[in-house]
Image (cartoon, rainbow, N blue to C red):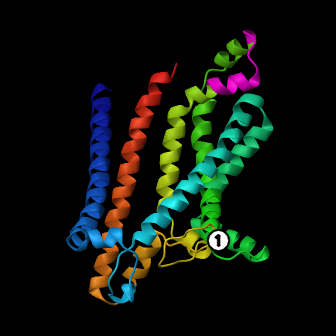
Amino acid sequence: MNKLAFFEEKLVKTLMYLSVLVVVYCVVSVIGAILQRGLPVLSWQMVSEVPGGGFFIGGKGGFLNAIVGSLYIVGGSTILGLLIALPVVFYLNVYLKPTSRFAAVARLAFDALFGIPSIVYGAFAFTLMVAVGMRASLLGGIIVVTIMIVPMLIRSMDEVAKNIPHGLLESSYSLGSTRIEAIGIVLRQIAPAIATATLLSIGRAIGDCAGVMFTAGFSDHIPTSLSQQAATLPLCVFYQLTAPQQSVQDRAYAAAVVLTLIVLVLSLGGRLIMSHFNKNKV
């Protein structure tokens, strides 16, 4: 029996090592392919200028419009998504009982919404925009990405909030705390979860292509208002990769390098924020 248990432990450990190696190999291969083709053609002109005439067929200029458009959409949708998700999380975990059927149904609904592809959200938002007479714009891109990331934000934060000891809230109520004051306690405990959920949402939002294709449109200029169309880096990569010219395809990889660097910087910043908030946990 001991030999069998020893063999099982070795087998499981070997499988775990192999799984880690496969994941690392895939990540390194993807990043390596992007850097190999993107870095040689990446220049300051590409990240500091908007597209010139015939940019997508080999003309001069850069994709600053796509960088700024992506940051606009990600920033706006993340802020709006948190403003929607946080009250829902507080309501589910502070105002409702742990055994509430409504909370269970709500969590099931958010799980279902979490798995819906982005193109479905894009088609849904586009239908609504057509119904109200709204054209493709920066605002449309922010709205569809917000709808897409809200379920992710809610479920990521809710899973942590559910594990907060119920005695902690009961103790605060016994000392005369109101529900609003109890929300402050929950907020301190789920602060790292907020940072993690925000990172996951930013990663999905900045990499979305199908949803914003329907709603944000595309423009060679940096939008100056919410009613103007906006380009994004994923769309910039998509349009350049479909070009027949090799030089244009290489610039798509340069845009992918910039997109990867932005995600990396945001991830490192999020890690620093999480390490700070972890000090406040009970």
Report the residue that reaches farthest toward the front. Answer: 224
| Residue drawn where x is 53% and y is 54% of the image | 75
Q: Is residue 207 above or below residue 199?
A: below
Quadrant of the image containing the N terminus: top left
Residue 176, magenta (yes or no)? yes
In the rendered structure, which amino acid carries the disc numbered 1? Ser
Q: Is residue 65 above or below residue 202?
A: below
Between 204 and 9, the one nearer to me in the picture:
204
| Residue drawn where x is 52% and y is 46% of the image | 198
119 to the left or right of 12? right
x, y percentage for residue 138? 59, 68
What residue sits right under mark 1 in the picture? 227
159 to the left or right of 196? right
* Number of numbered discs overlaid on the protein picture: 1
Q: Secondary structure at mark 1?
A: loop
Which span is picked out in magenta? Answer: 174-185
Between 154 and 71, the one nearer to me in the picture:
71
Residue 181, magenta (yes or no)? yes
Quadrant in which residue 123 is drawn: bottom right
Q: Main secondary structure of the magenta part?
A: helix
